Image (cartoon, grey):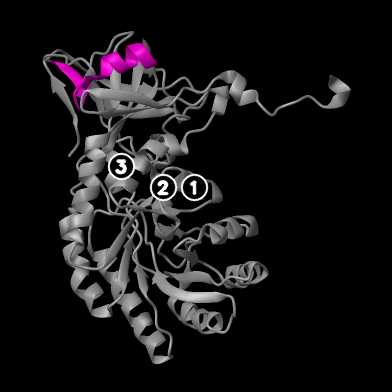
């Protein structure tokens, strides 16, 4: 569900015409619906209301402070994977004790910053990381709250580039090694064993992989208790998918139902890290047709947004629905490739898609672009990053202004022998 709909033949974000935003802010621009964000978070959070739990929004999905602040106001924590996301999360109002720090490559400076902030927990992913964090915490005279991320070797049945729970993936520790590392970590003086965690992938459309991973974590927790290691938190990660095309992912209620009974038996507080399921369908990429072009084999619609603005189609061959801002009223359809201005053959937003016969100057909305859209954007081809807009009812605000070329070059200089 989302709050983008046609009213009298024109596409709106809540009660604001997208054409108004395009006219005043320009294109390309990301547009987010605050009502959609709030509803998605509440539905997810309420699905687990009968269990002690904390929902930590996965900041990597969308790092806009306006998005994070919207969710923090509803009680969300943050799942972060960098020092930058730590700063963003706290600046947006997430209390440090609701922040979980994941990721395989934390620097010592990032560890120190998170310890100074007083975060809830580090999810650690290697033996060397345990030793490094113990040393950093020792120098600071602190105990670092830690969980080990377990790689349960579960097939998430998703795109190979976004599966994270197989033994061949870079994430986490296999179950047997994790058991040994917990025992070693218990003897490190500057660590506090807080929990156990896993995350098996992104855009999952079935609950079975989640249930399989939880079952394997349950066995490990039993072994740890037998060894005298008691934990407080069970971090099940995120990964619940959304509908981009024909997918039929489970609802948050179905997802919760598949996990709650087993999770309750383990007696630990749940930590959940949804990202895409909260923000994916709460955002669109608004862009304008620059030109159309016909070749002997293709009809191209060339728009002003490219793979630097939205990389998912190029990177994952992913489907993003394309909606015209003005409804065509049943006009002719054309099989089209929607492509951007980037000098790469892989620069496309849609391929072989049946679309209205779009014309130069027309506006289109790339749907389901709220997750891994702006947060993965680049400045390739020296293209400034686009504006972000938040809509709430009939109000809207630019929550990130469009970058300038001068800002792209800030910090650059010629070597002294060329000046």
Q: Is residue 249 at all visible to an observer of this figure?
A: no
Total count of labels: 3
**Real-space CA distance between mark 2 and mark 1, rounded to the nearest whole angstrom:** 7 Å
User: Dot 2: within a 10 Å radius of its alpha carbon, few (fewer than 14), some, or many (20 or more) residues?
Assistant: many
**Real-space CA distance between mark 2 and mark 3, rounded to the nearest whole angstrom:** 10 Å
Q: Is residue 96 at all visible to an observer of this figure?
A: yes
Q: Quadrant of residue 287?
A: top left
Q: Which residue is mark 1?
A: 85
Marks 2,1: beta carbons within 8 A: yes
- Residue 178 within the segment the image draws in magenta: no
Quarter the N terminus occupies: top left
- Nearer-N-terminus badge (1/3): 1
User: Dot 3: within a 10 Å radius of its alpha carbon, few (fewer than 14), some, or many (20 or more) residues?
Assistant: many
- Nearer-N-terminus badge (2/1): 2
Say the numbered circle drawn on residue 59: 2
Q: Nearer the viewer, residue 318 or 17?
A: 17
Residue 20, compared with residue 195, is above or below; it is above
Q: Position of residue 248 (x, y in %)?
A: 18, 48
**Real-space CA distance between mark 1 and mark 3, rounded to the nearest whole angstrom:** 16 Å
Q: Nearer the viewer, residue 276 or 69?
A: 69
Name the secondary structure under disc 1. helix
Q: Nearer the viewer, residue 97 or 55?
A: 97
Q: Which residue is mark 3?
A: 279
Instruction: Specify the segment rendered in magenta.
Output: 9-26
Q: Position of residue 407 (x, y in %)?
A: 60, 23
* Left or right of residue 104, residue 277 in this image: left
Name the secondary structure under disc 3. helix
């Amino acid at each position: 569900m989302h709050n983008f709909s046609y009213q009298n033949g024109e596409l709106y974000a809540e009660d604001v015409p997208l054409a108004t935003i395009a006219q005043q802010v320009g294109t390309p621009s990301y547009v987010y619906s605050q009502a959609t964000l709030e509803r998605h978070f509440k539905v997810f959070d309420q699905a687990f209301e009968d269990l002690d739990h904390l929902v930590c929004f996965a900041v990597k999905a969308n790092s806009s402070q306006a998005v994070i602040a919207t969710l923090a106001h509803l009680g969300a924590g943050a799942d972060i994977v960098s020092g930058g996301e730590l700063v963003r999360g706290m600046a947006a109002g997430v209390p440090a004790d609701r922040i979980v720090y994941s990721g395989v490559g934390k620097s010592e400076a990032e560890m120190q910053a998170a310890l100074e902030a007083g975060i809830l927990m580090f999810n650690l992913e290697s033996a060397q990381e345990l030793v490094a964090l113990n040393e950093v915490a020792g120098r600071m005279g602190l105990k670092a709250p830690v969980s080990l991320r377990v790689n349960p070797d579960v097939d998430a049945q998703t795109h190979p580039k976004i599966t994270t729970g197989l033994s061949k993936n870079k994430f986490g520790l296999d179950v047997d090694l994790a058991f040994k590392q917990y025992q070693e970590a218990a003897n490190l003086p500057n660590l506090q064993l807080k929990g156990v965690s896993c995350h098996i992938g992104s855009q999952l459309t079935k609950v079975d992989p989640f249930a399989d991973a939880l079952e394997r974590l349950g066995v490990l927790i039993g072994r740890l208790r037998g060894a005298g290691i008691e934990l407080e938190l069970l971090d099940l990660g995120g990964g619940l998918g959304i509908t981009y095309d024909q997918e039929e992912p489970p609802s948050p209620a179905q997802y919760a139902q598949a996990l709650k009974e087993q999770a309750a038996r383990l007696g630990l507080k749940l930590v959940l890290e949804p990202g895409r399921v909260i923000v994916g369908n709460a955002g669109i990429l608004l862009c304008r047709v620059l030109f159309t072009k016909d070749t002997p084999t293709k009809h191209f619609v060339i728009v002003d947004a490219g793979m630097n603005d939205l990389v998912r189609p190029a990177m994952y061959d992913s489907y993003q629905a394309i909606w015209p801002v003005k409804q065509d009223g049943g006009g002719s359809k054309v099989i089209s490739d929607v492509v951007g201005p980037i000098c790469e053959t892989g620069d496309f937003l849609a391929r072989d898609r049946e679309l209205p016969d779009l014309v130069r100057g027309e506006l289109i909305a790339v749907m389901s672009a709220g997750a891994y859209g702006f947060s993965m954007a680049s400045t390739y081809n020296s293209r400034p990053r686009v504006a972000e807009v938040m809509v709430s009812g009939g109000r809207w605000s630019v929550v990130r202004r469009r970058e300038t070329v001068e800002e792209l070059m800030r910090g650059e200089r010629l070597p002294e022998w060329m000046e």
